[in-house]
C-alpha cells in the first residue's frame, strides 16, 4: 500500500515524540549530575522546545494537507512565522529566569541541539522509507 | 584621505552605539533560514506547477527541506543559553 502525506506526518510526530522523550530522560540524568534539579528542568525545557519547534512544522503540514496549495503554503509558512515569534519571546523570557542557573543553561542548548539533529535523522529515514504514489491516471 | 576620515568617523559613531547584541544574533538566526525556506518553497511551487501529479511527493520533500533549514534557526535562537 502507498502512504499519503498525512500518514507520513503522523509517523513523524509519533516517532519524533518518542525520540525527544528518550533524549529528555538522558538529558535529565546528565543535568542532575551537572546542575542538580535546575539541570533536570533545563533538559525538560530543551526537550519541550525542540518538540514544539519541530512538531509544529509537521502539524502545520498535516493541517495544510487538507487544504489546496495556497492553503497548504499559508499554513506551513504562517505557522513558521508565528513559531519564530513565539520562540523569540519564550527564549527571551527564559533567558532572564532566575531558576535556570548558570550551570544548567548549556543543558538547555545541548538538549535542543541533540533533539533537533536526532529528529532530522529520524525524519530523513521516515521519508526515505515512505512509499509515496504519483497521482497519475492510467489510461 | 577623505575615506580614512570617513572610516574614522564611522568607527567613532559605531563605538558609541549601545544596546543588546543579541538583537543582531536574532536577526542573523532569522535571515538565513528565512531565505532558505523561501527558496525551498518557491522551487516546490515551480515543480508542482510543472508536474501536479507529484504534489504529494514534492510536499513531503519540501517539508524535509524546511525541517533542515529551520534547525539552523532553532539552534541560532538557543545560542543565548550558552553564550550569555
Image: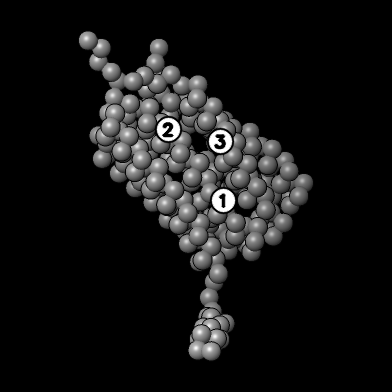
Looking at the image, which residue is at 37% across and 35% down? A61
Chain of the residue under the numbered disc 1 shown in the image: B
Query: What numbered label is drawn on residue A119?
Result: 3
Mark 1 burial class by Cα count in 10 Å: few <14, some 14-19, many 20+: some
Rounded to the nearest whole Å, what is the CA distance between mark 3 and mark 1?
13 Å
Secondary structure of residue under mark 3: helix
Q: Are marks 2 and 3 in contact (CB under 8 Å)?
A: no
Query: What numbered label is drawn on residue B61?
Result: 2
Rounded to the nearest whole Å, what is the CA distance between mark 2 and mark 1?
22 Å
Looking at the image, which residue is at 33% across and 26% down? B54
Residue at far top of view: A139
Q: Are marks 2 and 1 in contact (CB under 8 Å)?
A: no
Residue at far right of view: A33
* B84 is higher (above) or lower (below) than A122: below
Mark 2 burial class by Cα count in 10 Å: few <14, some 14-19, many 20+: some
Dividing the image into 4 quarters, which one contains the C terminus of chain B? bottom right
Residue A4 screen position, x and y as percent? 37, 22
Residue B33 screen position, x and y as percent? 46, 51
Secondary structure of residue under mark 2: helix
Q: Nearer the viewer, mark 2 or mark 3?
A: 2
Q: Which residue is mark 1?
A: B75
Q: Is residue B10 left or right of residue A30?
A: left
Of marks 2 and 1, which one's residue comes earlier in the chain?
A: 2
Q: Are marks 3 and 1 in contact (CB under 8 Å)?
A: no
Secondary structure of residue under mark 1: helix
Residue A50 screen position, x and y as percent? 54, 43
- Asked whether A103 or A109 is in front, the reply is A109
Amino acid at each position: 500500500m502507498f502512504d499519503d502525506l498525512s500518514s507520513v506526518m503522523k509517523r513523524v510526530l509519533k516517532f519524533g515524540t518518542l525520540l525527544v522523550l528518550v533524549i529528555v530522560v538522558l538529558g535529565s540524568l546528565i543535568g542532575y549530575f551537572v546542575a542538580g534539579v535546575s539541570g533536570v528542568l533545563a533538559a525538560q525545557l530543551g526537550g519541550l522546545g525542540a518538540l514544539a519547534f519541530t512538531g509544529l512544522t509537521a502539524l502545520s503540514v498535516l493541517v495544510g494537507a487538507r487544504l489546496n496549495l495556497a492553503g497548504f503554503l499559508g499554513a506551513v509558512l504562517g505557522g513558521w512565522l508565528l513559531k519564530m515569534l513565539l520562540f523569540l519571546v519564550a527564549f527571551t523570557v527564559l533567558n532572564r529566569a532566575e531558576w535556570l542557573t548558570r550551570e544548567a543553561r548549556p543543558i538547555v542548548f545541548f538538549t535542543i541541539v541533540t533533539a533537533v539533529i536526532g529528529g532530522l535523522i529520524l525524519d530523513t529515514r521516515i521519508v526515505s522509507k515512505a512509499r509515496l504514489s504519483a497521482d497519475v491516471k492510467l489510461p | 584621505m577623505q575615506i580614512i576620515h570617513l572610516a574614522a568617523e564611522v568607527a567613532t559613531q559605531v563605538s558609541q552605539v549601545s544596546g543588546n547584541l543579541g538583537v543582531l544574533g536574532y536577526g542573523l538566526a532569522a535571515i538565513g533560514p528565512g531565505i532558505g525556506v523561501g527558496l525551498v518553497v518557491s522551487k516546490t511551487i515551480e515543480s508542482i506547477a510543472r508536474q501536479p501529479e507529484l504534489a504529494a511527493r514534492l510536499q513531503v520533500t519540501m517539508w524535509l527541506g524546511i525541517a533542515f533549514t529551520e534547525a539552523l534557526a532553532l539552534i541560532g535562537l538557543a545560542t543565548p543559553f550558552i553564550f550569555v
